[in-house]
Image (tube, rainbow, N blue to C red):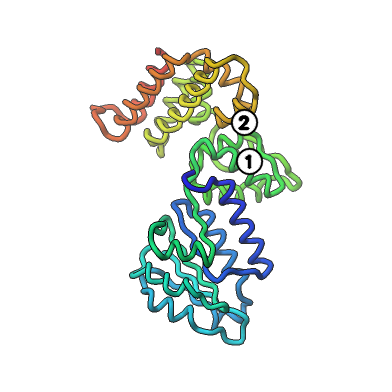
């Protein structure tokens, strides 16, 4: 994650949510970043807790950036609340607002009785400019950047832990493959799944994900990487054919997952050259996976020593180009995946 790591962002947002539920508010919040999950969490918590229902008619203003300018927002923010302790002004899609930077004038001395939320969905303030620097001093800035693929299983495990559940490593990997780095999608699918699990469930398994989320462990990119790790050619080619014929198959996504996998093997191989039997915490940091998967990578690094692994990474670069429309001839995306897997197995 660029900037703050997701663990710090998660902690910050949970603290904010705890504060607003206790009635503690800052005068200005800027919620921004490419990943909308955390900004949406904070914005929703403020909307739910800032005012009583009967106070909202006169003291809550929710507008959209494309419909307002800075003067309109400042005028609203400088009003005093009516028969309430505070008023709330929320600007959603603020990245589309005309003269957004001019809000810095208000944010230098915000009204104590106003809570102003500036929510930039999928976008961020320019950190070199006045509005960002001002709010950094007088309010709170939440910056939510996308997680990397390898961070997702840990995020999922933490998310389930917060809900009083544990999730098997295979299940976390499977859910990660299904949702990519879309945190909101994981939250939605988890809510749906939990409604269908038996009461009292404390551990979510890969079978639970298969039954309730609609993804097959047997025919998944996660399973394909495992089969390649063990150089199980018949199963790997069968899985590649099945995945490649799926209606929503996208070659770039498959190549990305394979690149992540082989880059881990490459890093692990480089680590082992410094000395055998590295400590588990070092292996976990280098591989970015649960210790449950160490056995697989111990095998993979034998099957793909550094020179072979570098050849696979180079091959993946070629197929990334092809998968994005470059010089494929008559080959379908499914054909490309089978060809790629076959070439990996023959390196």
The residue that mark 1 highlights is 157
Question: Considering depth in this image, is 238 or 61 the residue closer to the camera?
Answer: 61
**Mark 1, secondary structure of its residue:** helix
Q: Is residue 62 above or below residue 44?
A: below
**Mark 2, secondary structure of its residue:** loop
The image quadrant that residue 336 belongs to is top left
Q: Which mark is residue 94?
A: none
Between marks 1 and 2, how big is the CA–CA gap? 10 Å
Residue 118 image position (x, y, % from top left): 47, 66
The residue that mark 2 highlights is 290
Q: Quadrant of the C terminus?
A: top left
Q: Tell which residue pokes out farthest to the right in this image.
A: 200
Q: Residue at x 51, y 64 (%)?
A: 137
The image quadrant that residue 282 belongs to is top right
Residue 15 image position (x, y, % from top left): 64, 58
Question: Considering depth in this image, is 14 or 141 the residue closer to the camera?
Answer: 141
């Amino acid at each position: 994650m660029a900037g703050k790591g997701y663990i710090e962002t998660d902690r910050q947002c949970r603290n904010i949510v705890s504060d607003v539920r206790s009635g503690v508010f800052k005068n200005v919040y800027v919620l921004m970043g490419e990943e909308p999950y955390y900004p949406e969490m904070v914005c929703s918590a403020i909307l739910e807790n800032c005012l009583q229902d009967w106070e909202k008619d006169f003291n809550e203003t929710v507008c959209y950036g494309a419909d307002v300018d800075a003067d309109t927002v400042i005028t609203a923010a400088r009003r005093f609340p009516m028969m309430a302790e505070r008023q709330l002004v929320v600007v959603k899609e603020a990245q589309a607002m005309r003269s957004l930077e001019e809000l810095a004038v208000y944010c230098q001395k915000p009204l104590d009785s106003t809570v102003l939320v500036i929510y930039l969905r999928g976008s961020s303030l320019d950190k070199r400019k006045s509005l960002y620097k001002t709010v950094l001093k007088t309010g709170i800035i939440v910056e939510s950047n996308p997680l990397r693929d390898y961070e997702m299983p840990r995020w999922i495990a933490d998310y389930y832990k917060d809900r009083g559940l544990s999730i098997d490593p295979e299940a976390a990997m499977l859910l990660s493959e299904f949702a990519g780095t879309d945190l909101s999608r994981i939250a939605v699918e988890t809510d749906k799944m939990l409604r269908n699990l038996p009461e009292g469930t404390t551990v979510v398994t890969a079978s639970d994900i298969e039954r309730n989320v609609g993804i097959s462990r047997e025919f998944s990119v996660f399973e394909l990487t495992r089969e390649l790790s063990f150089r199980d050619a018949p199963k790997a080619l069968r899985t590649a054919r099945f995945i490649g014929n799926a209606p929503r198959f996208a070659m770039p996504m498959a190549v990305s997952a394979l690149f992540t996998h082989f880059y881990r093997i490459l890093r692990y191989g480089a680590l082992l050259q410094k000395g055998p039997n590295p400590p588990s915490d070092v292996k976990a940091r280098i591989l970015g996976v649960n210790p449950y998967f160490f056995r697989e990578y111990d095998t993979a690094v034998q099957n793909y020593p550094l020179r072979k692994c570098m050849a696979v990474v180079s091959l993946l670069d070629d197929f990334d180009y092809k998968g994005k429309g470059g010089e494929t001839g008559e080959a379908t995306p499914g054909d490309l995946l089978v060809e790629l897997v076959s070439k990996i197995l023959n390196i």
